[in-house]
């Protein structure tokens, strides 16, 4: 041991080449060492969520600059680099990304562009939302102006994805998520879009709620146009579903005795409440017009056209609104068709027979109350009666052979009288009409089948010259 | 400190060539030192040198020298340590294998 001390005093000359060795080692190894430590540090950060992370190495010291999403993430990032073998010091220049309070995210679209603004929670969410927006709104430019922030509520991503789905249903508008409250405004792209959005919002993730939904939809329009020249009734626009569609077409078949129905209706969601209950009576009113148009736009019913005579116009204006469900409005622009030229008794009879050949005056089953569906037909009969003022008219009631004769006789008389009452109410003098009942005595068809019986149940008009 | 251990292991594997060179240099110097007749370092200078090395070692362990200079210091101290080990082995071996002239000198 003492020898070692003695010898060691003579070891110094070797330090001169050692110093040269040192300098060479330092000269050649510094850059590769820094590169090695840099790549190892970057690899160590791989599984830690950071934004804008930047690793710089000087000697064995690593400087980490990054935006972290939580205090934990920040600590674990520093710890991960400290654990890299060979790293001497970690210079922690990480910071937390700012917290947004409230955490607001919104998507606003117009015709050509969707703009995302506000805060996104994580780069992955940001990317996912941008991707979803591009996929959901094909062909629309998507601009992402969101900034990364902390403070997003749980399930934010699901809520935002759902919101983006709804934005796709808007023509223009804005959806904002503020913490867990969602507000929507704008105009739905399609009829029923508002309902579709409201339905989708029921699937919001837990904790989220709708603060306000002011999405508007284009008006729900239904139109019926009665053209007496072409003898057509044309339907356009929308109906809520097939059963309402069927009900409307069937009602038209009962109410319009000579027109052919041209059905261009499409089914769509978004109909106002009570749609069928408003449209069916409105069609009844249209059937009483000579020529006319019915436009149902949301809850506003606009009926325009020519009534067949003065009293009909007044009745329509006064009565139709009573048949509507609550909240519906009527705008009636009804004028009166100019009176047609008077005709003599023969032509008058011919006109009656023609009209009654196309349609039958209907009553409630077994009773003498006029079926409201026959109002259109009765108005046409009234108009004809107005054209031949110099005649007397016998209104004859007939029944089928079911039931006993006395009852049928009475029923036929009462039914004929009901028709006369209708004509008198329309402004014709009662003295021109006589109501006669024939019971089942004058059948025009066999009473052994339903079709024949239906033909036998009828009202006939018999025109006589005034004495 | 396992961190230090890991760091030394890392540096040793990264710089094994240089360290081997320092070891061989030390071995050679130690080998020669036994029979060298020149002047050694005086006790006073040796103390100063030891104090200097201790101060540098302390600075390295305390990690007060920043960045590249800190790394170069670590590297120098490692090379020096290996060199001294080489010297010790060299001298001891020479002393054991050739006892005559050295002990006589």
Image: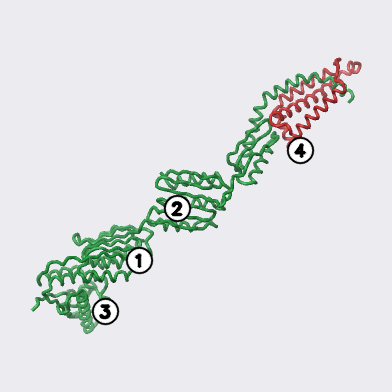
Chain colours: A green, B red
Q: Can you tell which mark lies on residue A367?
A: 3
| Alpha carbon distance from label 3 to label 4 | 109 Å
| Alpha carbon distance from label 4 to label 2 | 58 Å
Which residue has dot 2 on it?
A: A166
Which residue has dot 4 on it?
A: B1
Which residue has dot 1 on it?
A: A328
Q: Does residue A441 appear anywhere in the picture?
A: no
Q: Is residue A6 left or right of residue B59?
A: right
Q: Secondary structure at mark 1?
A: loop
Q: Quadrant of the N terminus of chain A?
A: top right
- For the residues tagged 1 and 2, is the chain the same? yes
Q: Secondary structure at mark 3?
A: loop
Q: Nearer the viewer, mark 3 or mark 4?
A: 4
Residue A222 to residue B60: above or below:
below
Q: Secondary structure at mark 2?
A: helix
Q: Secondary structure at mark 4?
A: loop
- At horizontal 17% and vertical 65% (from top left) the residue drawn is A338
The percent position of residue A379, horizontal first and vertical second, equals 21, 70
């Amino acid at each position: 041991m003492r020898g070692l001390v003695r010898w060691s005093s003579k070891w110094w000359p070797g330090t001169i080449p050692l110093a040269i060795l040192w300098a060479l080692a330092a000269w050649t190894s510094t850059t590769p060492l820094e590169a090695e430590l840099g790549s190892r540090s970057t690899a160590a950060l791989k599984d830690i969520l950071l934004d804008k992370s930047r690793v710089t190495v000087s000697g064995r010291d690593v400087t980490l600059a990054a935006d972290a999403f939580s205090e934990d993430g920040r600590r674990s990032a520093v710890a991960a680099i400290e654990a890299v073998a060979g790293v001497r010091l970690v210079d922690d220049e990480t910071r937390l990304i700012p917290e947004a309070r409230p955490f607001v995210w919104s998507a606003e679209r117009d015709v050509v562009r969707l703009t995302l603004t506000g805060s996104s929670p994580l780069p992955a969410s940001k990317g996912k939302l941008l991707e979803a927006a591009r996929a959901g709104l094909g062909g629309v430019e998507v601009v992402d102006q969101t900034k990364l922030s902390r403070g997003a509520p749980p399930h934010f991503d699901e809520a935002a994805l759902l919101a983006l789905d709804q934005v796709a249903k808007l023509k223009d508008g804005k959806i904002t998520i503020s913490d867990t409250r969602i507000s929507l405004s704008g105009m739905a792209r399609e009829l029923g879009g508002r309902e579709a959005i409201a339905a989708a919002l029921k699937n919001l993730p837990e904790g989220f709620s709708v603060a306000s939904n002011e999405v508007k939809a284009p008006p729900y329009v239904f139109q019926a146009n009665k053209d007496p020249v072409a003898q057509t009734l044309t339907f356009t626009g929308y109906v809520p579903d097939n059963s309402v569609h069927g009900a409307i077409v069937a009602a038209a078949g009962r109410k319009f005795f000579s027109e052919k129905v041209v059905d261009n209706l499409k089914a769509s969601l978004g109909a106002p409440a009570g749609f069928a209950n408003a449209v069916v009576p409105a069609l009844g009113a249209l059937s009483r017009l000579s020529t006319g148009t019915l436009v149902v736009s949301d809850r506003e019913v606009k009926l325009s056209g020519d009534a067949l005579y003065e009293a009909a116009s007044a009745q329509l204006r006064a009565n139709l609104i009573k048949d509507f469900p609550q909240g519906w409005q009527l705008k009636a622009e009804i004028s009166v068709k100019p009176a047609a030229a008077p005709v003599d008794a023969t032509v008058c009879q011919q006109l009656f027979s023609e009209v009654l050949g196309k349609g039958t005056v209907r009553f409630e089953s077994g009773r003498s109350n006029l079926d409201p569906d026959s109002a259109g037909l009765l108005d046409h009969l009234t108009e004809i009666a107005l054209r031949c003022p110099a005649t007397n008219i016998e209104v004859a009631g007939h029944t089928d052979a079911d039931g006993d004769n006395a009852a049928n006789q009475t029923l036929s008389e009462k039914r004929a009288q009901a028709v006369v009452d209708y004509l008198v109410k329309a402004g014709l003098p009662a003295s021109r009409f006589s109501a006669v009942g024939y019971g089942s005595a004058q059948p025009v068809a066999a009473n052994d089948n339903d079709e024949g019986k239906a033909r036998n149940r009828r009202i006939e008009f018999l025109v006589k010259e005034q004495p | 400190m396992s961190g230090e251990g890991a760091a030394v292991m890392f540096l040793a594997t990264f710089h094994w060539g240089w360290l081997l060179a320092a070891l061989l240099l030390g071995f050679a110097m130690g080998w020669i030192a036994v029979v060298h007749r020149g002047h050694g370092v005086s006790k006073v200078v040796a103390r100063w040198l030891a104090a200097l090395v201790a101060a540098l070692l302390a600075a390295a362990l305390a990690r007060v020298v920043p960045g590249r200079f800190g790394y170069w210091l670590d590297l120098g101290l490692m090379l020096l340590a290996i060199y001294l080990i080489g010297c010790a082995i060299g001298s001891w071996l020479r002393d054991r294998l050739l006892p005559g002239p050295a002990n006589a000198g």
